[in-house]
Image: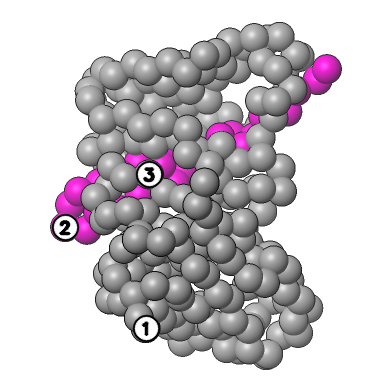
Amino acid sequence: GQQVMQIPQYQHVQEGEDFTTYCNSSTTLSNIQWYKQRPGGHPVFLIQLVKSGEVKKQKRLTFQFGEAKKNSSLHITATQTTDVGTYFCAGGTNFGNEKLTFGTGTRLTIIP
Amino acid sequence: EAEVAQSPRYKITEKSQAVAFWCDPISGHATLYWYRQILGQGPELLVQFQDESVVDDSQLPKDRFSAERLKGVDSTLKIQPAELGDSAMYLCASRRARQVNEKLFFGSGTQLSVL
């Protein structure tokens, strides 16, 4: 079945440093969504990418979808303590049954 | 903003007992999902409903898990009998339509501990 892997599994950064998480799918995706889960919370939708090579920005967050639609990345510039949490990508496929498969997640901790 | 409601928030049970979780999706959301999330991992799909029909339950351990959404609105997930390995967060999510490009709205989850 489809697998979605993320690296790194954990990332500890000093406040103000940048952070990047990478997402790789074993199959071609129709779209990719990113979610953030705060400690003790539930996943909350951040953004969706649909087009090959697409880049979207939300303030300090930059999301990219690879040309082959099999990988994606999330980059945070100048991290803040509010960025703490686990970031999940979720790959969508349209092959018979519309399905979102979540990645393994990257847990970000910030050192003040 | 409308939310997905789940109860209970926490559940502690002994192995071999039966447990049930309830979910009420956002009004008008036809598609409902139950996910299981083990600590440190991503959500894993257990079952997907479109209205009252099961669309995908390929990852649901059917010997002990069951799920229903009788009137196409709220849903119940049951485990009988519970096993130690079932300890996890059970998340319910809904989306407006079945299309894969619709975003998911998650409830706060039920944290299950099996002793």
Specify start and end residues of the magenta stretch as a single range: A86-112
Label 3 chain ID: B
SS under mark 2: loop
- On the question of residue B100 being in view, the answer is yes
In the rendered structure, the answer to whether residue A99 lies left or right of residue A24 reads left
Tell me the residue at 57%/88% (across/down).
B80
What is the three-letter code of the residue carrying label 1?
Answer: Leu
Kindly report the secondary structure that dominates the magenta region of the rendered protein.
Answer: strand
Q: Nearer the viewer, mark 2 or mark 3?
A: 3
Residue that label 1 marks: B70
Write down the chain letter for disc 2: A
- In percent of width and height, residue B15 lies at 71, 85
Residue most toward the left?
A96
- Element at label 1: loop
* Residue type indicated by callout 2: Gly
| Circle 3 SS class | loop
**Residue A106 image position (x, y, % from top left):** 59, 34
Depth check, front residue: B41 or B53 = B53
For the C terminus of chain B, give its image quadrant. Answer: bottom right
Q: Residues within 10 Å of mark 2 (few under 14, many from 20)?
A: few
Mark 1 vs mark 2, CA separation in Å? 24 Å
The residue drawn where x is 26% and y is 30% is A50
Q: Which residue is mark 2?
A: A96
Q: Which residue is mark 3?
A: B103
